[in-house]
Amino acid sequence: MEALAQEKKQQQNRELKERILQLKKEKNAIILAHYYQRDEVQEIADFRGDSFLLAQKAASTDAEVIVFCGVHFMGESAKILAPGKIVVIPDERAGCPMADMVNVEGLRALKKAHPRAAVVAYINTSAEVKAETDICCTSANAVQVVNSVDADEIIWVPDKNLGHYVSQLTSKKMILWEGYCNTHDMLTVKDVFEMRKQYPHAEFVVHPECRPEVVKLGDFVGSTTAILKYCRESKASEFIVGTEDGVGYQLRLDSPDKAFHFASKYLVCPNMKVNNLKKVAACLETLSPQIYVPLDVAEKAKQSLERMLLIK
Ligand code: 13P
Ligand code: SF4
């Protein structure tokens, strides 16, 4: 019975993939997918990447339509960087709880309390918050961005865990917002110790959105792209992975002979997983839901994003 249901699902997916390919051509669309998306969504993407690579791609594509498979702030960043394009997302409910932890009023109050500080915003923020900041960053370039800013004091929003990690690698004074990623913050030292006991020969690779005491245990600490590169190039054949489980898709593609054990069964971002093939086909078909950003907000937010894209 289960085999039958599986065969039916596979057939449905094949049909959806064909439909998506056809619609993509008709609409002159490109599908961008974050590494945390479901496997079948990553599989049909024209381009897979982390937040930084996807922002870069959105800014440079020739396509008329961008289908952004990720969470809301990512689609919004794409629209800000490519205002002439139609940007659609498969499901409007795909938000980022961490991005929602910082608001404009709170940030303005913090800026008032620290008038000499520059504001660095993780790309996981709303367009309105980005418009209040000097420069954006992602986990792939956070240290370079902070060091590039012409100020000794930095207001950092919203991820306190990534902020703590960066603060150890810069001489600047960092004022950290109290936000965090629900998914990464769930990983505990106990989880890692248990995995190490179970897989004593594996290397532990970890994303800096995890808690500082967990990050400290890493054999390697880095952004999604950095983790992928490290695992590809490492001589080790087994890894305990401390980041969202969607990354397994690219890890297994890159290194089919290596073993990847996710450090906890809770390393799944429910927001990233609301997108599926059916919704990708539907948003291409109807060109909705579309992302709109008010012009005045978009103009200011764009400066922060473009400054980030210039950092080498
Ligand atoms: P990166 O894509 O920068 O690795 O960020 C991780 C993340 O949590 C995205 O929401
Ligand atoms: Fe937000 Fe964390 Fe999900 Fe990324 S993994 S979208 S930071 S909740």
Image (spheres, rainbow, N blue to C red):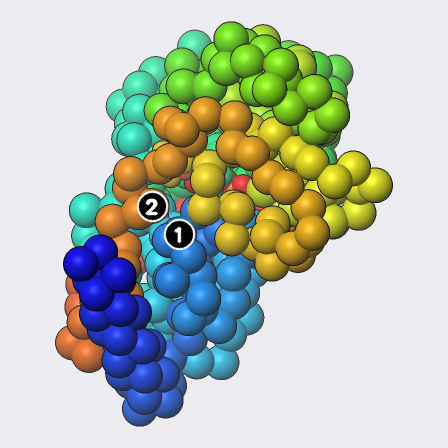
**Which of 160 and 294 lies nearest the eye of the viewer?**
160
Residue 249's x, y, as percent? Answer: 51, 53
Q: Could you tell me how far apart the alpha carbons at marks 1 and 2 are, in whole angstroms?
A: 6 Å
Left or right, residue 20 beside residue 168: left
Q: Earlier in the sequence, mark 1 or mark 2?
A: 1
Asked where in the image residue 150 lies, by quadrant, the reply is top right
Tell whether circle 2 marks a residue whose Cβ is less than 8 angstroms from ligand 2: yes
Amino acid at the residue labelled 1: Gln
Instruction: Give me the residue at 52% from left, 67% from top.
Output: 47
Q: Quadrant of the N terminus?
A: bottom left
Which residue was labeled with disc 1? 37
Determine whether the residue tagged by mark 1 lies in a helix, strand or loop.
Answer: loop
Asked where in the image residue 86 lies, by quadrant, the reply is bottom left
Instruction: Give me the residue at 40% from left, 14% from top.
Output: 178
For the question of whether residue 171 can be seen, the reply is yes
Which residue was labeled with disc 2? 272
Tell whether circle 1 marks a residue whose Cβ is less than 8 angstroms from ligand 2: no
Residue 33's x, y, as percent? Answer: 43, 59
Residue 46's x, y, as percent? Answer: 48, 72
Contact between marks 1 and 2 (CB within 8 A): the answer is: yes
Above or below for 108 versus 136: above
Q: Which residue, as the protein is rendered here, is positioned at the far bottom? A: 26
Residue 251's x, y, as percent? Answer: 60, 49
Above or below for 145 versus 86: above
For the question of whether residue 294 can be seen, the reply is no
